[in-house]
Image: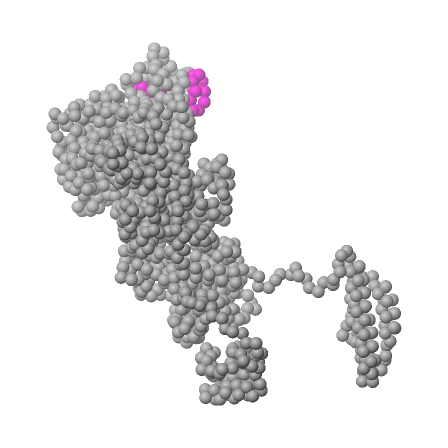
Amino acid sequence: MKISLEWLSDFVDISGIDQETLAERLTMAMAEIEGVEYLNHFVDGILIGEIVKCVTISEAPIKNLVTVECGGKTFQSICTAPNARVGLKTVFAPAGSEISNGLVEEREIEGYKSEGVLCSSSELGWNDIHEIILECPDNIHNGSLLSNYVPKEDCLLDIDNKSLTHRPDLWGHYGIAREVAAILGRELRPIEKVDLCLFDDLPYYPISIDDPEDCPAYGCIELLAPRHSPAPLKIQRRLNAIGQRSISLLVDLTNYVMLEVGQPLHAFDADKLSSNIRVGLMDREQNFETLDGQTRKMLRGDLMIWSGDCPVAVAGVMGGFNSAVDTKTKKLLLEAANFRGALIRHTSIRLDLRSDASLRFEKNLPPFFVRESVGRFLYLLKAAGHFSKASSRFSFSGSASGETRQLTLPPKFLSQRAGTQLPDEKVTNILKRLGFQSFFLTSGELHVEVPPYRSVRDISIPEDIVEEVLRIYGYDNIPMRLPEISTEPTKENLSLSTEHKVRRFLSSAKRFIEVHTYAWFDSNWLETIGFIPPEGALELANPSTQQNKILRTTLIPNLLALIDINKLYQEDFRLFEIGKIFGEQWGDEKAEKAEASRLAGISFSSQKDRNLTEHFFEIKGALEGAVFICQNRNVNIIPIDNDNQPWQQAGCWGKIFINGREIGSLGIIEQPLLDKVVDRGQIIWFELYMDSVLPKRIYPEIEFTSISSFPLSWHDFSILWVADKSYGELLSALDDFEHTLVKRREFLTHYAGKGLPSGKISYTFRYWIGSNERTLGSEDIIEFRDSLMKFLSTKNLGLR
Amino acid sequence: METISFNEVREAFAKEVLEAKAIDDIEKLKVKYMGRKGVFRRLQDGFDFQLMSAKEKKRFGIEFNTLKKHFEETLIEVEAKLVGDNVTLVRKIDVSLPGKDSRIGAIHPVNLVQIELEAIFQGMGFSAMTGPEVVSEFNNFDALNIPNDHPARDMQDTYWLKNGMVLRTHTSSNQVPALKKFGAPLRVIFPGRCFRYENVDASHENTFYQLEGLMVDRDISVAHLIGVMKTLLSEVFHRDDVKIRLRPGYFPFVEPGFELDIQCLLCGGKGCLTCRTGWIELIPCGMVHPMVLKHGGVDPSKYTGFAFGLGLTRLAMMKFSIPEIRLFNCGDIRFNSQFIATV
């Protein structure tokens, strides 16, 4: 929103303070000023004159030879504006004066003498509208100086709209002036209005409101339409400066009041209404022609203004064509109303009709403005020399809310919240400047009266008064303090600390790169890789695109999608992600926590000489390491011989267990999926349930085992095992062997091929044996070998 | 069998060393004398030890070793002279070749910042909590005093699930569950991922990270908020001279609400291309709204508190000079691999 300082000066003296400082002070105490813009206007030597003669000298493009009368002196000029006509009062820059295109000179154009320029608002430096010349009201004397009506310069403050959403009282110049006065400690001048009680003898204009929630207040007055005329120059200039087009006295004044008071006004042609107004919701779908001539589809639930049985305006958004004011309008119905913000917002967004008016209604305006704005409109109309005869009283329905509201703050409330001592006198003074009357009771309580222009949403609890006082007091004036806190230790968050441990390990020890992918799947990609999300997957009601509507149930597909975009830059890389997956199965009754934490990784290599098995076991090692650092020692992985998900292909993947609990899976990607993911290379993947690997806080976390002072000896055995069974199964068979001398069993190598009985694989293990009490003798070793042999034969295991 | 005497060898060597003019010559001498089929080997092979007495063997050994040592030292010396200044050792290995397996991976920049902040907050007595990303409308909005008709609840601002839940739009959704669970006093941070319905471009993302902080205790005031924020930012930016300012800001779950600006660290507040005004808007914060405390089961007449929301993604952009927000979720290793895992 733009605020003109020249306009603001009507209500508060801002002399003696430079604009940048003012902007800064408003930012610090009110709302963010995003920019300061300086305007320079051309006024010196420029006159108001009346066109007394207008002769067309060429048709296309139109060119008129115009004679302008400026207070006894006449000038001749060539003018191309289509609105040049006899009787028009306009602005004339005689030779020697300066306008935006430069110094005006006497010239000859096509044989005619031109003694100056008839000015558009662009030539005066107001804006860039240059097609038409300015139109001035009739009551300005010919020959008057332009400088009597408009300033030479102005300055605009640009306020961030978002920072004003909670302050509907600040959506006009007067509201800002009130703040400026409070912040600078200067006087706020009253806004002049016509007393609406003057019309109380006239008949009431019937208003009915279906639901006061949708329309808390509605006011209107019926008037004789003012003669069609341009608005006063001062008003035209101000509207132009803040980016509005000047149209006619009536339109300009409604806009002007909105930009000054903050309350949008609407004028109906009263003769096109059925002498009553009703505010109510649309009860069915219906087309409605708005005053811009467009047909809009209105839906059930849109708030409309009705007259008789006919909708005449989309409330707060735009009037109807059927009731629009035109040049023939004799009688007006001027409306000032107050609507439920959300209704206006929904309708205006749907119709793509967001205007200055709807923007204000969305903020839930204080009903107080309704009466204010009508009084101001009538005052400005009168000041412009148009006395409009009213044919109804100011009619009103709803809550007027012209009353103040009371709040009581407990003793010391303000100083406690601030964290510094605020003197009572200072508090009441600040509140007074903001228009709040207040006093301290002997009990120490502070009694505050909230003025009616501050909305209920904005000021309703003692904490709201804290903000009012402190922002004017100045947050910078509050000395900082650190809380005196207890020495109670912070609670450890085991899932966070574990997550960080794993991410440090994979990245710094195993050269994985951490990535983040989106929380949803890409359904096109899922189709490519042949993955169908399981039942219970969560779906977005309003996804950004339809292909992103299903929330991920596993991290693997999004990671696989990264291979293709990265393969050009590195022929070998490892990625991991720690993040949430979603699905109903993890939800409790209220469906919160419908999610679980996952760690997933992929390793890609397109190196020609890369050994796939080696590659796989490197990644498996990294994964096991990640599980080990979470203090889980017994990880095992069981091969699975069935297909499951597309990346879980029979014989190429396994499930990961800790102490019999499934905690994830890992595998190699083979054809046919491999071709769909990448044209060339190897992919190893894993996915781990983070919630299942969390360490338990046990005591002792690590238990020391005593170190023997006697030497160990080692003995290697190559055991033959059935080729179609896994190493894991052999291990669990060997786990049954218990012998007091065995300190450790170590896997050395495995061999399949020549020299072995068919269908067998040889696995070589090293057994370390020893005793804590003595050095072993040969009889101990013989005894150990015998019992191992005996054990192996019970399992039908032979040596190579 | 041909026998060579020590003397012959010594003399021949002395002559040849004198003639050596280049490193290559030294290499040749090394092969000739020390090599597998070299003079020393032959010298050794030329003696029949079985015919020697123990004493003879010992004398031979001493002489042999002395001579060999002399040769070695002479060769090193001569080589050093030939190589030039100060080189006293024969280079056995080019240690400047790359080490094996020294490559380390990377941690996502957001997580790098998160890890750092968690440590700072832990030092200040704040525990860390992560809440769910899929949350109820109540926890994301109602509990935080956000009116029923607030625009943030619209479909164009928030991702809604078909089951009526929402993808949390801020980590503030943790405030009430944490108050309910732990009560007051409470010092806690909530780092985590948030979602807003946005069209993705260079400066807008629908997925980003925040770190919310909440402190509730008796008599917590605006002065405390300023103190904690200033201390925090001094730690984050490793500077003692961090200047901050509070100005009015509006968020329904705090009252009063603030925008906290930090004085630009690049220009020191003079105004530059990055900050324009000398200040950078950094942390929305405020005093916890009494309705939020009530929703959390905490009595607002006994306890007060403050809350603040740090944009982790935004902080990472500042800290690492990352110009585009959409890089964070792209999974492009040219981006991700830059953030070496050094924490």
Q: Position of residue B98 (x, y in %)?
A: 62, 61
Where, by quadrant of the figure, is residue A390 drawn?
Answer: top left
Residue A165 appears in the rendering: yes
Q: Position of residue B218 (x, y in %)?
A: 33, 47
Q: Position of residue A617 (x, y in %)?
A: 50, 71
Q: Is residue B205 left or right of residue A345?
A: right
The question of residue A94 being in magenta is answered with yes
At x 38%, y 46%, the residue is B308
Where, by quadrant of the figure, is residue A441 drawn?
Answer: top left
As rendered, which of A209 and A317 lies closer to the eye? A209
Q: Is residue B279 left or right of residue A199?
A: right
Which color scheme does this rendered protein use?
Answer: one colour
The question of residue A380 being in magenta is answered with no
Quarter of the N terminus of chain A within the rendering = top left
Residue A266 appears in the rendering: no
**Picture mark count:** 0
Which residues are drawn in magenta?
A86-112
At x 44%, y 40%, the residue is B244
At x 40%, y 26%, the residue is A17
The single residue placed furthest to the top in the displayed view is A72
As rendered, which of A551 and A302 lies closer to the eye? A551
At x 39%, y 57%, the residue is A491
As rendered, which of A695 and A556 lies closer to the eye? A695
Where, by quadrant of the figure, is residue B82 drawn?
Answer: bottom right
Quarter of the C terminus of chain A within the rendering = bottom right
Q: Position of residue B118 (x, y in %)?
A: 43, 53
